[in-house]
Image: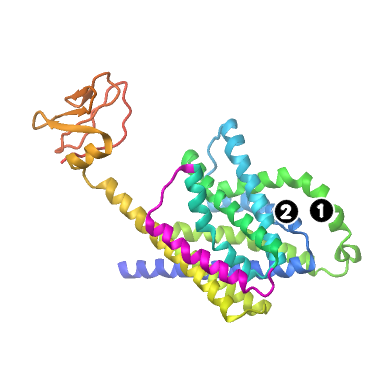
Amino acid sequence: MADTKQAREVFTVLFFCILWYVVSSSNNVIGKMLLNDFPYPMTVTMVQLTSITLYSGPFFNMWGVRRFVDISWSYYMKVIVPLALGKFLASVSSHVSIWKVPVSYAHTVKATMPLFTVVLSRIILGEKQTLTVYLSLIPIITGVAIATLTEISFDMIGLISALIATMGFSLQNIFSKKVLHDTGIHHLRLLHILGRLALIMFLPVWIIVDLQNVLQHPTLVSGEDYRVLALLFLDGVLNWLQNIVAFSVLSLVTPLTYAVASASKRIFVIAVSLFMLGNPVTGTNIFGMALAIFGVLLYNKAKYDAREALKKETVLPFSQQSWQDKTGYVVYPSSPQHSVIEQKNSYPISNGYLNGGNHILNNNTSSNNNISNSNSKQTGNLLFV
């Protein structure tokens, strides 16, 4: 019975991964075909945002996705609105890059996302990474540099747009995690909110910038060729579906498995685009792409190892020396049930109580219970050995 359940889970994950790869590669190929005939990246972005807005609400309600929680107006303006702005700008930049350069090269440049994530997390959140994580960035940078130098259809605007899009998506990842942590909102509801807000914010901008040019496009003027309209509709549906499938895969597997699957998806997209669109490439160019993707895999493994090490450091009991080094407090046993904890050059904590009543600690390892008073806030169990 257990084997049957496990086999069903493996089959489900495999099915969603294959669906993710097919939808994502189709979305990129169709997007390239669309932008070749209809060079309006902002309009393509607005169609995708409209698709997210129209389809998400009814589908999420039918699927039973929980409603979003109350968010204060100040938090909404400080975090959610900038996130929606970043989503729109990153999406437009991504479409400009696909328009100007081959899909394979655009996705190779997007492999630099770990580099942007590490740098921006260090600047914004003050996060430090392990040496292994930093070293894993070297093959990514080297691979992208080789692919850039050997790209036959190189375009500077395409390169810059791809880099801007990658940085924008990195910022979205960082702040989206913050919103999910702060509010407890469901990630699919957050996707719906950002898409709807970005659509409302930039609809006037699109009307001013693109509407007149779009209405003068030969396809719309003649009213006979529906190919562009069909590609616009299909691109919007596939983009929305890609987001849904990606989140579904994320909910089924571990973060490391998802990261590896995402890197593999990028390889699949590059291969399909080369086959379907027939972009000319050289052996050195392919080597650069492969090296960049390999660097992404190394980065994901290094990040996973760092997280596991941090978990062990948090879960394992403190020794007296490690606790003293970490907090500055010294633990003195006073009885089998309690300890006296004294901070260097400060006041002692007797029987688990800090003079002043702000914090309370207990060293009763048999029950592992925290003692608290009316002025303290529980921060978790601590075990001293």
Q: Is residue 129 magenta?
A: yes
Badge 1 vs badge 2, beta-carbon distance below 8 Å = yes
In this rendering, the answer to whether 135 lies above or below 279 is above
Numbered label attached to residue 251: none
Q: Is residue 51 magenta?
A: no
Out of 62 and 80, give the one closest to the viewer. 80
Question: What colour scheme was applied to this rendering of the protein?
Answer: rainbow
Left/right of residue 336 with respect to residue 252 in the rendered view: left
Q: Tag 1's secondary structure?
A: loop
Left/right of residue 229 with respect to residue 279 in the rendered view: right
Out of 347 and 30, give the one closest to the viewer. 347
**Residue displayed at 66% across by 59% down:** 160
The image shows residue 181 at horizontal and vertical percentages of 46, 42
Residue 258 appears in the picture as rendered: no
The image shows residue 330 at horizontal and vertical percentages of 19, 32
- Amino acid at circle 1: Asp
Residue on which disc 1 sits: 210
Q: Residues within 10 Å of mark 1 (few under 14, many from 20)?
A: some
Q: What type of secondary structure mainly makes up the magenta span?
A: helix
Q: Residues within 10 Å of mark 2 (few under 14, many from 20)?
A: many
Left/right of residue 43 with respect to residue 224 in the rendered view: left
Q: Which residues are magenta?
A: 125-154
- Amino acid at circle 2: Met
Look at discs 1 and 2 and give the one toward the viewer.
1
Q: CA distance from mark 1 to mark 2?
A: 10 Å
- In which quarter of the view is residue 130 placed? bottom left
Q: Quadrant of the C terminus?
A: top left
Residue that sits furthest to the right in the current view: 222
**Residue displayed at 83% across by 47% down:** 208
Out of 256 and 146, give the one closest to the viewer. 146
Residue on which disc 2 sits: 46
